[in-house]
Amino acid sequence: MRIEEAGLSRWLLESLKREGIETFYPPQAEALRKGLLQGKNIVVSSPTASGKTLIAIMAAHRHLESGRKVLYLTPLRALTYEKMVEFKRIIGENGLGFKVAAVSGDYDDPGEWIGRNDVIVSTYEKADSLVRHRAKWLSSIGLVVVDEAHMIGDPDRGPTLEMTIAKLLETLESPQILCLSATVRNIMDFAGWLEAVPVQSDFRPVPLREGVLQGARVVFSDGETRALKSGGEPLSALVLDSLRDGGQVLVFALTRRKAEAYAERLAQTISGSKVLDESWRARLEDYSRKILEESESPFSERLASLVSRGAAFHHAGLGYFHRRLIEDAFREGAIPVLCATPTLAAGVNLPARMVVIPEHRRFDSRSGMRSLSVTEYKQFCGRAGRPLYDSIGYAILFAANRVEAEYLMEKYIRGEPERVFSVLGSERHLRSHILSLIASGLARSELALGRIISRTFYAHIFGTQGLSEKIDSILEMLQAHSLISRDIGLEATRLGTRVSELYIDPVTCIDILHYTAGVERLSTLAALQVICLTPDLSETTVARIRSSTLERVLNEIGEELLVEPPDPEEYPEDYEFHIDSLKNAVVLWSWVNEVHERDIYERFNVEPGDFAAIRERAEWISYAASSILEVAGRKKLASVYRALTERLKHGVQEELLQLVSLPEIGRVRGRMLWRNGFRTVEDVRRASLDDLAKVPGIGTAIAAKIKRAAEELNP
């Protein structure tokens, strides 16, 4: 179908032609035939790069023209940015006037300012937060796009996505729902739930060849075999063959350690070959320098060394700057080989000619050794083949012997993705969402609560009977801790409403009030220990240090703990839980006491991405603690957590909080100002530009900026 035949507005046609789009891919044409522009709810299941975003843009243009807004939901921040860029490029530029924004985080923001935009690209959690805050502009939404809809089956994000859809169905006036996924096998279940029509397609703009490598030979699904041309161990030989043919390689590793080990092995292979010319090596050296310029640590040095030799790793341990740098370098073709953990497959769009999966089994702490799901494998395959660059993409599994090769061929290459099921039965997620329904006024009675629960995917598949007992138990718990009242219908207390707005687990609130009961003062370490014991922080341990090392560090700090760990022999699981939470608390204590990041990485074996994530999360829970304690009337302790929140944000001792409020002043420059006698904003205001500029790390430009800011704060 040619784009002129679709009935699109002239401005959209012109924009698509500027993108070089003349005809539609099969799934796009089918969605149009099945009522996309007539407001039909549609569930699309088609491979990565088959044009699902354009389907969303075409549906969006109909609503934008009628003055309604579009809400586009994604699971990851990186994806919100990618989709914002795509929407802006096609409908937000060239004088069309439609405003596009990407939003995530800051769950205590009512979000009314967001309503100034026409297309809002949001993470699942942020969208749920906006519903909890009852943002007025939500009533203007005409289209809800759910990207990566198979994430409903994800144990962490699934319940939030499912409940957010149910809430939007309850509150919006006849919205059009468009679900997009590359791997939804039971598409009819989704279609039945949303009263939608299915669009299912195997079309790929770049054909995919899947095969299994055994020894030095690849057997493809059509029976063709291909011997490796390069010598050496199989992974290196396969990668070199692809590079010599001019294609990049994406290696999926099932753990961070494996990703780094593969990158090291392949960097040695590449540097020892003649596959890269001098200009390519110069580009790699440039990226390597940029990595070291951002931060110096053993982690950064290792990454920079790998990049200079032609390989890199990508996992959650990377900090934001390094992650974006590696992604950009790979996207631009500078880095020939990227070794990544599975999160990349569901995240940013980084295709390569060849995708390699050396292992299909990994260790799970809860279930032991576990095989990859077929869905995960298909997600990996989605990254094979770069549109406009490759005429074909390859996905290669590794087998140890012939029997395993046959097994991999049948299970993964010829197999279908698993069915997607709801995981809403998780009590932890359910209690948070039930409180939010009551606090937002959507469920003023148990009957209304049941009606909204009946709108969920869980209820569509299983009915609500299996949830009834859990819901009753949760309501009793929320009432027992004064978060809701059941005297006349269902109503959130002031405390319950605040917990819902803060987007935290109700048990986090209960724990904070319990641990601090009767306490008037807290040391910094004790205040950190409390928030690290809550469910919102306790599930992630960032430090990998021995208990003996932890004990030595605690002795050095010399601060009293508020909660002593239980007896390890009598309560071994509880003891381990407390020790892990203490590790987090000690890392955060080091940060707020201005220990250099490099020292934190080395001393506690913490990776930059993990460190950034725990700091951000701890800052939020500290802020939540200050709000909860304020509502509870415990103002002194609330002020402790308000100060701790700012210290976690900036990584400073309390005495520097005034200085780091100034522009361009972080923990290092703040401490230099302090040492040179500038200890308050008033000191900066009164100082001469020359005196400020003489402070190491300040200079004339920053001196002028901070002096101007100080004068505005203290006129």
Image (cartoon, rainbow, N blue to C red):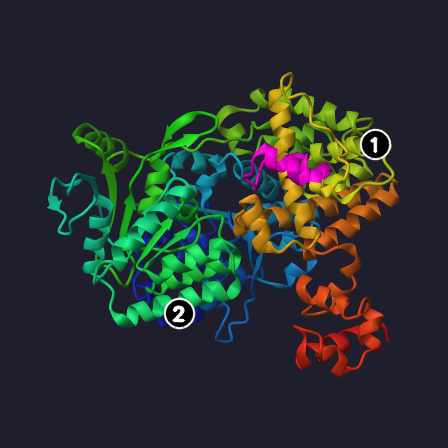
Which residue is drawn at the image coordinates 11% and 46% (left, top)?
227
Kind of residue at disc 2: Asp
The one nearer the camera, 44 or 481, is: 481
The one nearer the camera, 360 or 32, is: 360
Q: Earlier in the sequence, mark 2 or mark 1?
A: 2
- Relative to 376, 88 lies left or right: right
Kind of residue at disc 1: Ala
Judge whether 232 appears above or below 452 on screen: below
- Relative to 518, 449 lies left or right: left
Splitting the image into 4 quarters, where does residue 673 fall?
bottom right
- Magenta span contains residue 115: no
Taken as a whole, is the magenta stretch helix, strand or loop?
A: helix
Disc 2 to disc 1, C-alpha distance:
55 Å
Please report contact status of discs 2 and 1: CB closer than 8 Å, yes or no.
Answer: no
Where, quadrant-wise, is the C terminus in this rendering?
Answer: bottom right
Q: Is residue 392 visible?
A: no
Q: Position of residue 568 (x, y in %)?
A: 63, 21
Q: Position of residue 710 (x, y in %)?
A: 79, 73
Return the residue at label 2: 286
Q: Position of residue 421 (x, y in %)?
A: 46, 31
- Magenta span contains residue 545: yes
Q: State the SS at label 2.
A: helix
Splitting the image into 4 quarters, where does residue 689 fall?
bottom right
- Decide: few, some or many residues near mark 2? Use Cα within 10 Å; few <14, some 14-19, many ≥20: few
- Relative to 496, 547 lies left or right: left
Extent of the magenta region: 529-555
Tell us which disc is closer to us: 2 or 1: 2
Return the residue at label 1: 517
- Decide: few, some or many residues near mark 1? Use Cα within 10 Å; few <14, some 14-19, many ≥20: few
